Image (tube, rainbow, N blue to C red):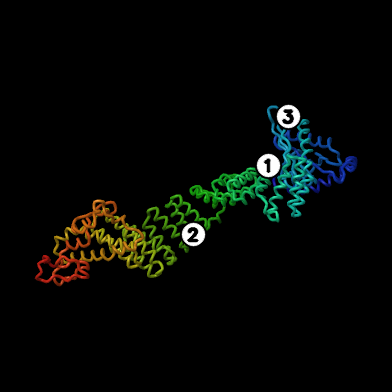
Amino acid sequence: MKAPHRSALVIAGFAAALAASIAPASARAQRNQGPGPDTKKALVTAFRGDVEGGVKAADEIRNRIQGEYSIKVLMPISKKNIDATLLQSGYKPDSALSPNDIKELAKLLSADEVIDGVVTKTASGYRVATRMFLPRDPNLSQPLVTVESNNFGDIARQVVDEYDRARKQIPDNQACENAIRANAPSAAILAARKGLVSYPRSTLLRLCMASAYAAAKTTADSTGPWKDSVIALTKSTLDLDKTNKIALTLQYDAYTARHDTANALDALIGLMNADPTNSTTREQVIATLVNMGKADAAIPTAKQLVTDNPGDPAYARTYWLVLRAAKHYKDAVAAGMAYVAADSAAADSGYFQRQIADLASDSSYAKAAELAAVAAAKYPKSSTFYLLKGQNERKAGQLPAAKASLERALAIDPKLPGVSALVAQLSFDQGAPDVAVKLLKADVASDPSNKERDAQLIVSFAQKMYQAAAASKSVEDYRKTIPIAQASEEMNPSAAAKFFLAISAFQVLATTSTELQKSKNCEEYKAAGEMLTLVSTNMQAAVRSAPRRPSRYWAPSRSSRRSSSNRSRNTASSRHVTIVSHKVPRHSTGDLLALTPPCPAGAADAPAGRRDERGSRTQGPVRPPRPDSHSAAPCSSP
């Protein structure tokens, strides 16, 4: 029965009472003479399933109860009163009601117990599955019997016989529930155990006992193994009634308290399957699955909510968020679009940020940039969307557009964290390392706290430039690396900056050593001396302060691993180092100086560490040779 009909049943209650008051006098007299003050009323409506079979089964069961029970003990609510109430509610007589609607009808008719069932037509007759439940909650349910027969009289006999046995648990169940209300779980457990002796198949008593153990966790009995007892009782309940929601709920709580995630999840899914039409339960299940990190398991349920409630923005949003939690980004983007189609007001800044993030997570950077552009147009004063636009344009390879977007973000918020560094990175990516360094120097000038980060970024530029130089084997490429590494060292000294500064200078010397021997140009000697100074002053410091040996870039090959004695006897011999997967000639710094003729008198002093006129190692700068010295050939001015 649908929700509007429930309210109709409530309205019909007064009408049904009025109809009863004007019933024939003989019927009223018979009824008044029959039931006693303690007579219980049983409600049996038409069973669901096969229409004809459902009506016949209910009629036969009512007749059987009326014939077998004393009216002082139990009486069925007449079909006449049931049909009158249904008619007043806008229903046809003999309507098959849902359990919740039967609950409402039972309240109107003051029923104490309900017999409910489902009838299925079979090849040989009918299959009838029955249960008893208490009107206050259809989940307080006791399965009766499932009978297959083509004789409804025989079906009714078996159902009522089991119903008679099941009713024996009701007084003990009432005592158990009263004890729980009185905060006496031990007394409740004793009452339930007593009732189970008279009716071992009882689900009501098992549920009450499990509830008593669950209640004990907040009393002096909480030290007992209440979780294990609840789990054991609910398992035996579910063996008798596999869709009992109360048992599943208690079991879920106990497993959760025991931190048994796997079994808690099984109980939760069982709870959802027990009542698939209950949207509230499904939402709870979805939320719990997502919180447990099981968003994938919640997707079918969330999707079914959307299917069952087309156009409902709340369920569309739930489905979208579940897909996001499950990291199904492509599907999440489509679900997000469906959500704002159902509710245009939902397209706020948070929606755009989530959609952009999901597109980027799906590697759809160009689409993410396009959506960021839409968001930036809607929120022109927000730097966030220009930043997101620039980041995704960069990942999509749209470097000029990315730089323009990031510069627009900085124009809105000059202190936007990290954006100056990102613009510098874009400048470097576009082949302008000098511009990149200039931007980073300006960034440090405006906020000195950024110097460590920006210096590290410049070192990364130097590393990439060195790797490119190693690949091209171009001395000019090595020279271009030096000022970049120097900029990092000046901004914030580091072992990495020293290393790339020294190794780049070393490669310039190693690559030009042959030509330098033939040259008589003093400026070339001076430049070589400057390179040597960079090597000698930075490499040792880099090695000493580096967390690990920089062998990736400067590691002797196996052929160069000679003993120290051999090394001392062969100081001028040629060796090799492995530089980024290729070999270049290697000389010691002393060897390189030995290959470099000194400048004539009047030229700049040679670098520290040169050999003197006799070939001995000196401390500090070496004085230029006297004009009459024959130890070195004179060189021409440039």
Circle 3 sits on which residue?
Answer: 149
Task: Work out which quarter of the rendered image holds the C terminus and state it.
Answer: bottom left
Q: Pick whichever, 171 or 310, lies toward us.
A: 171
Where 223 falls versus 151 (above or below)?
A: below
Q: Badge 3: few (under 14), some or many (20 or more) residues near its Cα, within 10 Å?
A: some
> Given the current orientation, which residue lies at the most extreme top position?
124
Estimate the spatial distance between the alpha carbons at disc 1 and disc 2, rounded to whole Å.
59 Å
> Where on the picture, by quarter, is residue 1?
top right
Q: Earlier in the sequence, mark 3 or mark 2?
A: 3
| Camera-side mark, 1 or 3 | 1
- Asked whether, in this view, residue 375 is left or right of residue 549, the answer is right
Point out residue 38 in the picture as x, y percentages from the top left corner. Answer: 85, 45
Q: Total marks drawn?
A: 3
Q: Badge 1: few (under 14), some or many (20 or more) residues near its Cα, within 10 Å?
A: some
Q: Tell me the amino acid under the disc marked 3.
A: Ser
Point out residue 217 in the picture as x, y percentages from the top left corner. Answer: 68, 54
Q: Pick whichever, 216 or 29, lies toward us.
A: 216
> Where on the picture, by quarter, is residue 623?
bottom left
Circle 1 sits on which residue?
Answer: 236
Q: Can residue 100 be spotted in the picture?
A: no
| Camera-side mark, 3 or 2 | 3
Estimate the spatial distance between the alpha carbons at disc 1 and disc 3, rounded to whole Å.
29 Å
> Where on the picture, by quarter, is residue 392?
bottom left
Q: Residue at x 26, y 58 (%)?
A: 477
> Given the current orientation, which residue lies at the most extreme front position?
565
Q: Tell me the amino acid under the disc marked 2.
A: Lys
Q: Earlier in the sequence, mark 1 or mark 3?
A: 3
Q: Can residue 375 be spotted in the picture?
A: yes
